[in-house]
Image (cartoon, rainbow, N blue to C red):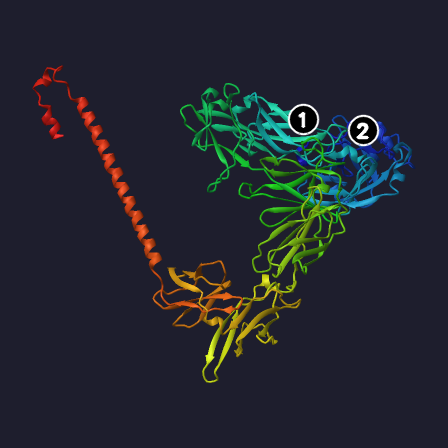
Amino acid sequence: MSWHNILIRFLQLNFLQVVISYRMVYQIPPQSFQLPCEPTGKRSSFPFPVAIAENSLSSNEEPDPTETNATALVAEDNFLCCHWTDTYVNCFIYAAEMETKTFTEQTDSIWNLQFWTAVSSEELLCVVGLSSKSSYLTEDFTINLLYTLTDVSLESNSTNSLKNNFTVVQCTAVKHQKYQCQIPSVRLNHTYIMWLKITHGMALLQSPLMSLMPVDMVKPESPLNVKIEMTDKGKLKISWSNPSSTSHPLQYEVKYFANASKNVYQAVEIAMETSLILSHTLLDSSYVFQVRCKSIYGPGLWSDWSLPFNFNLQDVMYFPPKILASVGTNVSFYCIYKNKNKIISSKKIVWWLNLVKEVPRSQYTLVNDFVGKVTLINLDAMKPGGNFLFNALYCCNENKECNHRYAELYIIDVNINITCETHGNLQKMTCKWSTSTDLLLSESTLLLRYYRSDIYCSESSSMPADSEVKECHTLRNNSYECIFQPFYLLSGYTMWIEIKHPLGTLTSQPVCILPKEVVKPFPPFSVQAEITREIGMLNVSWKNPELPKSDLQFQIRYGLSGTEVTWEMHAVSAVSECCASIEVQDPCALYIVQVRCSVLGGAGYWSDWSRPAYTAVKDIKAPLRGPEFWRIVNEDPVQKQKNVTLFWKPLEKNLALCSVLDYVIEHTTSENITWSDYIENDTTYTFPWTEDVHSVKVIAVNSVGASTVNFIITLSQQMDTVNIVKSLSVYPINSSCVIVSWMLSPSIYIVTSFVIEWTNLHEEQIKWIMVPSHIRKCHIYDNFFLIEKYRFSVYPIISEGITKPTVTEIFSKGGIEKQNHMNIYMIFLLVIMCLIFLIAALLILHQRMKTLLWDDVPNPKKCSWAQSVNFQKKVDIL
């Protein structure tokens, strides 16, 4: 505040009594005042009242009846300090503590004083400024403020007793011949006694005693956000907001002037609210507005003037020039259109959005003869393009002539989802929310506001005025995290996001959170998983978290362990159970298992998945059966014996349950001699065949036991000559599949199975499959090269042994040729049918054309001109 611009007449008569003595203490008014002081030896041109002269003597002196002027009572070592009025002056004589030679050469000076305390501070401030005509005065001033706090009545205290206990504050220079004194930690409702000591060189100036109560000196902060709006009736309204530190009602002064260069104030109006309706005649010029405030209660001080708001008259004026709105809301703009200093009638105003879309006239409103209004309804989200982050709204005349000025409409999507989680130990609640920066303006500030109800959620969906702001931390991807700790489990927290921007404040839809309904438990721990013996079930067990003390439900996910796990889910039906058994397709695989939990009843969240547990591959039970195997008989003419080589495929896990440690070859001869050979997980075995009949069985053995169901092959010299297969045919389908078909001769033997054997004669690698006894046709899948030769053999197996095979090395083509012939016949038949339909269609079309032509030919008997025309030639031509 500029103290030189405030010209306040000094103390009123009710503060200064005519009779003044050393016992007098002056109460400081709640505004700046002046302290004129006159140095020693300088005569006043004002007559002094007799009472002043009498009371200016010390207590030990007797009055001299010859002296009638106060200046005659001043000794050389004393000086005057006076309070001036328009009619008289009150002066006081003080004994100088130092020499006053410096002051004796100076002209009169005035010290401007003002005391105040800010609303947001506990400090009492005093500004002391010197007004003097002496240009040669140096700035070598030392100013001290002495003060004491008293609760005793001033009438019962002497000034000397008040000065016995005081505190000294040294004032600091803030500008040229202006000083600031600061008293910390003041008590607003207490009385302070203070005085100034001003020294300049060896001279001393001491003010009278002054008293004040800081509560009477409260100076509010300046009003904020001064702006001009348009009312629904087309009048201008200036509005502002209270300073944030205000805690009591205020009154306001509004000043505005038309010419800022001349700084001439045209009007000052008083307002009790934070807005003031102005006359629309102000539209004829440009104005500058400022507002200040003061407490309604008590004397108090006026605040500093607010920052000036310039209202510039333009060709087209928009009220407001910018609007910040949310998606789905309605907004209104006002417009005054001037052309060559003439206001266009509001009936001739049209509105365009971004100069590409005319706003429907149904959304126009004629406020008065010169103010038009448009309302944009159900706003859509903006689609930013280039550097424009707003929609431009143009006010144009009826000829669609638009001024280059436009109003700006900023639209923000405030549909922000707030989610909260109460930690499993019930010690804190974490809330998260995120938003997109594409539609947020750079100057936006996002806050999470909340209101806590004592119990459960409030039935009202409104936003309470006494809400609080929660501090949040920024995470990645424009997401935020806010932690409530401590919190109330049964309370209802109503939350919303507040978006603050210089253009306004937007809020998201409030949501009410009950901490007890958003509990996210800690995951189960000590999870174990194993495949049970005998039945091959996946058995999972775990331990529950200690908190919350509620019934829990569980989910298990499991899958084959690998780089990419395909999870399968399993819900535990029993509540609060700590184990579950799951039937799996492959009990011999390695599984990864995790468990999670949530509060029973659907409230809250699932916990995180537990640490993974892995099953160990181990044998469940003995193999279901031994492997199927085949043999190759090789004769050794030198030693005149046959060697038999057995070979088989490794037993699959679903049959081995789950692994095979050894294979046991069990031999039985016709003499009932039995022995066994152990093969360590090999797939071939060779032994000599010397007996007429030799039976072989291959048994699979794992850590649990040996297979009980096993395949047996009986080698018989006699059965090798028995021929059961009557015919054998092999039909190639493609390079990967052939069909093997055979027929049996009438026989007394009962076939138990067939073995189909094939080999590429160039590779001599024998391949085989075993098929059931009722099969007579079999598809064999392999890589076949039809230009090469293959040998196919079919071995009927009976209980007495392996019979003589039927062998072929030729692919039969009859089946394929027959099939090809049938395909040709079908194609030929379809072609014939298509030809028949085509001929029939042509005949029908010809008949219709002929009928149409004859209908147009006139009857010669009834038409005179047609009697001489030969229509037969016309028909022949057609």
Where, by quadrant of the figure, is residue 859 drawn? top left
Q: Residue at x 61, y 46 (%)?
A: 479
Circle 1 sits in a helix, a strand or a loop, which is it?
loop
Instruction: Please tell me which residue lies in front, 339 or 100.
Output: 339
Q: Position of residue 583 (x, y in %)?
A: 64, 54
- Amino acid carrying label 2: it is Phe
Query: x, y percentage for residue 111?
Result: 73, 37
Q: Amino acid at mark 1?
A: Glu
**Which one is earlier in the sequence, the residue at label 1 or at label 2?**
2
In this rendering, would 484 be left or right of 755? right
Residue positioned 53% across, 43% down in the render: 438
Question: On the image, numbered disc 1 is attached to which residue?
Answer: 273
Identify the residue shown where x is 81% and y is 29%: 16
Question: How many numbered marks appear?
Answer: 2
- In the image: residue 24, left or right of residue 252: right
Task: Report how far apart the C-alphas of labels 1 and 2 lie in the structure.
Answer: 33 Å
Query: Crowding near pointer 1: few (<14 within 10 Å), some, many (20+)?
Result: some
Q: In front of the other: label 1 or label 2?
A: 1
Find disc 2 in the rendering and name its residue. Answer: 15
259 or 595: nearer the viewer: 595
